Image: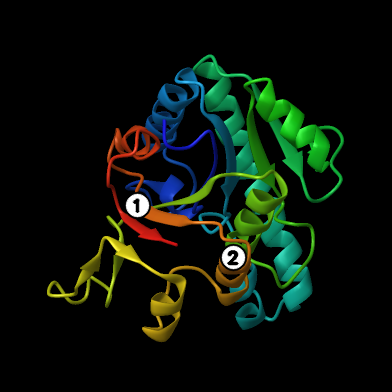
Amino acid sequence: MTYKRILLKLSGEALMGEKQHGIDSKRLTQYAEDIKKVVNEGIEVAVVIGGGNIFRGVEAEASGIDRVQGDYMGMLATVINAMALQSMFEKQGMYTRLMSGLKMEQVCEPFIRRRAIRHLEKGRVVIFGAGIGNPYFTTDSTASLRAIEIEADVVLKGTRVDGVYSEDPEKNPDAERFSNISFQEAYEKNLNIMDMTAFTLCQENNLPIIVFDMNTPGNLQKIVAGEEVGTLIQ
């Protein structure tokens, strides 16, 4: 296997599947099945999930909600998604731990770096909820920071497109797709891969990012086996 320990970043919107909001059980099941195959091959897996299918903190101000309050509401939304993932993972027979950036003793462990690493070493899938526990930071930033803290080999950003393009491929079918690109090139081309905080964290810590289509079954397994899937940023 190319990677021993991975951090998988999933968007909350991805969990909607064909629905307009909430969680699609079919999509949840597919993700769990794909992750189980990777875990069965001895890969240590950590997951960060967004909350956009329930609530987006950055959109709170438009409705008159204080931005900081809205961000905390968004963090709680990620915990709901994380609990759904945990339930489905365990239904598939995986051992899991849910760790939170906010204290919620009844449903999550607090995030403690050494404990998270120990869970991974024991073969448990670790799910990080509630972001980093502070407002103004996205779940992309959470993914980058947690990946660095747990010494992951790579950040895998699972999306609904098969990589990074010069433009939005859903708007421009002639957009150029990159198979491999440097952090500097991505910055110069102003490619919208992650928010700048998350992107800079990965660049400064030499942590590669792979953007790939998580909705295609088997792609995750191909990546950890070293096949060229999606776009590699390094």
Q: Which residue is mark 2?
A: 56
Quadrant of the rendered image containing residue 13? bottom left
Q: Is residue 78 visible?
A: yes
User: Residue at 75% of width from left, 39% of height from top?
Assistant: 99
> Is label 2 or label 1 in front?
1
* Percent of width and height locating residue 106: 84, 32
Q: Position of residue 148 (x, y in %)?
A: 67, 53
Does 130 appear above or below 23?
A: below
Q: Quadrant of residue 174?
A: bottom left
Q: Residue furthest top?
A: 93
Q: Position of residue 54 (x, y in %)?
A: 56, 55
Label number found at residue 212: 1
Bin the neighbour count of mark 2 within 10 Å (Cα to Cα): few under 14, some 14-19, many 20 and up: many
Instruction: Looking at this view, name the residue that lies furthest to the left.
Output: 174
Residue at 75% across, 35% down: 116
Relative vertical location of residue 188 with respect to residue 85 in this rendering, above or below: below
